[in-house]
Image: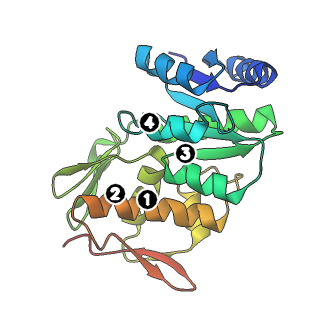
């Protein structure tokens, strides 16, 4: 089944370019001109991913994502006409999975969409490798779910991939490059602040279910998985 992508942007030319590129890559698209229409479309039919412009009038993309995260963990790829780091950080903190600045390469956008979709719906794993645990933290790649002490974690695809990378090397200190290599395609560069934002989100979600020692910072080196309540 082809992936269903919702594209929300107030510029009809941008919508047309994105939809053409995604459909050429074998996906189905639905385009809407504003944030309110995006939320209505998602309520009618949950897409596999949302391409969401930050700078839409009346209800911007950040507000759409904030409302969306109350009820859904659908992957979100943000678009912005400004290369402002604060926009990128805010978008990721609100639960966005990636960020593309206009003008953008349609080919790169398709690559980023495919990376997010692969993370959100990973291929089935061998029967003897269906879950990873550390302390009271449990990840189940086959169902792409996580929990701490039996309490479910609402992880985005990027956050799940980062945690999975830590669980694969629980005693190792991972530098920022390696942390993000676990979550993004090797040819996609992300800033240090983006890495820190994802780590902060993961810590907050684990703290909310009682895990206060999820990820330790090793200053000047990177991050290491904590005891996770063990």
Residue 199, given in percent of the width and then of the height, sits at 47, 64
Compare residues 52 and 145 and report the one nearer the observer: 52
Pick whichever of labels 3 and 1 is earlier in the sequence. Answer: 3
Compare residues 113 and 45 and report the one nearer the observer: 45
Residue 173, given in percent of the width and then of the height, sits at 47, 78
Residue 228, given in percent of the width and then of the height, sits at 26, 70
Q: Which mark is residue 100?
A: none
Q: Which mark is residue 205?
A: 2
Q: Is residue 190 above or below residue 49?
A: below
Mark 4, residues whose alpha carbon is within 10 Å: few (<14), some, or many (≥20)? few
List the residue tagged with mark 3: 97
Q: Is residue 139 above or below residue 123?
A: below
Q: Is residue 56 left or right of residue 164?
A: right
Question: What is the secondary structure assignment of the residue under circle 2?
Answer: helix
List the residue tagged with mark 1: 201
Question: What is the secondary structure assignment of the residue under circle 3?
Answer: loop
Real-space Cα separation, disc 4 to disc 3, in angstroms: 16 Å
List the residue tagged with mark 4: 67
Real-space Cα separation, disc 1 to disc 4, in angstroms: 17 Å
């Amino acid at each position: 089944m082809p992936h269903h992508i919702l594209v929300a942007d107030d510029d009809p030319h941008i919508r047309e370019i994105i939809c053409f590129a995604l459909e050429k890559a074998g996906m189905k698209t639905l385009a809407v001109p504003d944030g309110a229409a995006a939320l209505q479309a998602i309520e009618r039919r949950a897409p596999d991913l949302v391409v969401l412009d930050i700078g839409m009038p009346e209800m911007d993309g950040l507000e759409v994502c904030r409302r969306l995260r109350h009820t859904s963990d659908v992957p979100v790829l943000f678009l912005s006409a400004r290369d402002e780091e604060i926009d990128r950080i805010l978008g990721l903190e609100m639960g966005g999975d990636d960020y593309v600045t206009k003008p953008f390469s349609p080919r790169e956008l398709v690559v980023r969409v495919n990376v997010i979709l692969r993370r959100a719906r990973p291929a089935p794993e061998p029967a003897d490798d269906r879950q990873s645990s550390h302390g009271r933290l449990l990840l189940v790649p086959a169902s792409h779910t996580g929990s701490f002490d039996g309490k479910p974690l609402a992880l985005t695809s990027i956050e799940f991939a980062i945690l999975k990378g830590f669980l694969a090397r629980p005693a190792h200190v991972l530098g920022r490059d390696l942390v993000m290599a676990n979550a993004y395609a090797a040819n996609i560069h992300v800033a240090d602040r983006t890495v820190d934002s994802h780590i902060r989100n993961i810590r907050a979600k684990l703290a909310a279910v009682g895990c206060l020692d999820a990820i330790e910072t090793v200053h000047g080196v990177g991050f290491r998985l904590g005891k996770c309540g063990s």
